[in-house]
Amino acid sequence: MVIQWFPGHMAKATREVKEKLKLVDIVFELVDARCPLSSHNMYLDEVVKDKKKIIIFNKIDLCDRAETAKWKSYFENKGYTVVYTDAKNSNNLNKVIDKAKEELAEKIARQVAKGIKPRAIRSMVIGVPNVGKSTFINKLIKKNVANTANKPGVTKKQQWLKLNKDIELLDTPGILMPKFDNQEIGKKLSLIGSIKDDITPLDDVSLYLIELLKYNYLENLNNLYKINVTSEDENVFIMEKVAEKRFKKIGGDYDYDSTIKLLIQDFRTQKFGLITLDNYSDLLENEEHDEN
Ligand code: G4P
């Protein structure tokens, strides 16, 4: 089963985002620090074109810092400005404002030189679902304005929120989910809650999680379930070891359903510890593979 992760309302939402983009000088793209590449909109440059962009690695408190730092360099080498944030705990949010001002300093200086009094910088937040866009907006302005349950396609009157005298932020984030056909990215987006469970083959997602853990975080996997598997073991075998530890057999068979749910839930509630799903050396290997 393939993840049906680009339903029609997303296309509508993308059109709406493009409309809003016309109003702003700078875009804050929020990505999940646990998978900065997979949750980044690959078509951001096409969609946003001539606007300034800052990529915000949110949920920095949940990731494996060493791995995520490689992704920060990766994006910086491509010319992006990257800021780490933990929106839930209001960490580093002012850095985003400082960086936005830096990015637009030249434009503002040009206006001043021409004798034009610069208006406040206009900004907006975009990103895939569940990366923390609404939390980020609410914490940044220290009020509940962005509805965390806000649905793409539901229109309401836009408002500009004053972050300080120089910069304003659109009160509703843009929800983006471009079309691409990489199922591995889909599975990571499912793990971080960007794709709804009811359109996702959770058995595949949990086996994929086992695969990522056994290669990159084997100790975390073994410690959590008190098992002793190796990265050479098959994913299904590992799932059965987890099932054996946690659930009674049903009619002599492993309780796969409960184990699938448990694995995904344990990832989402950080039971494995600090994990980064996007592995930088995998990207390098894939690039090498493509070249040959
Ligand atoms: P969205 O608008 O992009 O869809 O995301 P939203 O702000 O609704 O945030 C999704 C979830 O991520 C929320 O958790 C929120 O608290 C959490 N979150 C946002 N930023 C951070 C962060 O930097 N670190 C961590 N650890 N969590 C973050 P929830 O479980 O859906 O709700 P609740 O925990 O707030 O009750």
Image (tube, rainbow, N blue to C red):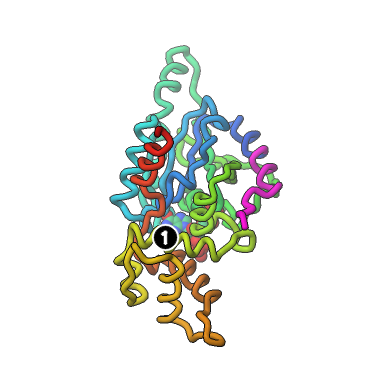
Q: Secondary structure at mark 1?
A: helix
Task: Judge whether residue 5 is colored magenta.
Answer: yes
Task: Judge whether residue 174 is colored magenta.
Answer: no
Of 117 and 20, the residue lying toward us: 20
Q: Residue furthest front?
A: 292
Count of numbered tags? 1
Q: Position of residue 146 (x, y in %)?
A: 57, 51
Residue corresponding to mark 1: 211
The local crowd at label 1, few if under 14, some if 14 to 19, many if 20 or more residues have their Cα within 10 Å, is some
Residue beneath the point at 60% across and 60% down: 200
Q: Position of residue 95 (x, y in %)?
A: 36, 42
Of 195 and 50, the residue lying toward us: 195
The relative height of residue 74 versus residue 245 in the rendered view (above or below) is above
Residue 157 visible in this rendered orientation of the protein: yes
Residue beneath the point at 40% across and 21% down: 106
Q: Is residue 259 left or right of residue 280?
A: right
Amino acid type, mark 1:
Glu
Which range of residues does the magenta coloring cover? 1-15
| Rendered-image quadrant of the N terminus | bottom right
